Amino acid sequence: MINPLRRSPCGRAGEAGTGAAPLTAALAYWMLQQRIVVSQGESPILKKAIGNGWKGKLSPVLYILAIILAFLSPWMAVALYVFVALMRVVPDRHGIWQSRRALVLHTARG
């Protein structure tokens, strides 16, 4: 069995580097989402679809924490990476169905 956290020539920087790619992706996604919201103005449909966006705001913070933890405890860092991935997989409570309902109501009015 291959141990992903075995001692590597990079030391603990390897586990810290593992969080760099998802951190940059999370930041890019958050910035893109903010730009889209600003470009659409006060669209109630878009705001309803996005919700409060707590996952998008929390993910970069947890990735930064995991990168710091990688130097102290690589297993904790990997556990945090897995937690963030699982958190992103679980659908939000507001969900796509409420967004579709808002779109139908919006188009029916005008």
Image (cartoon, helix red, strand yellow):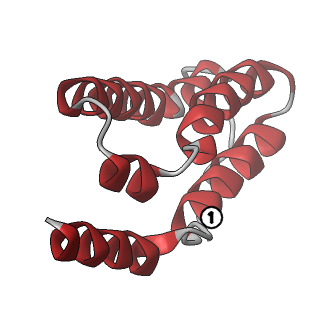
Q: Secondary structure at mark 1?
A: helix
- Quadrant position of residue 39: top left
- Where's residue 38, x and y in %? 28, 23
Placement of 31 over or under 84, stated as above or below: above
Which quadrant of the view contains residue 48? Answer: bottom left
Q: Is residue 46 visible?
A: yes
Locate residue 12, reporting x and y percent: 68, 23
Q: In which quarter of the view is residue 25 placed?
A: top left
| Left or right, 30 with reference to 35 | right
Q: Which sits in the foreground, 82 or 14?
A: 82
For the point 57% across and 29% down, the residue is: 60
Where does the image place residue 53, in percent across and percent down from the top left? Answer: 55, 44
Residue displayed at 80% across by 44% down:
75
Q: Position of 72 compared to 74: left or right?
A: right
- Judging by the rendered image, the residue that carries numbered circle 1 is 86
Amino acid type, label 1: Leu
Q: Is residue 4 left or right of residue 50?
A: right
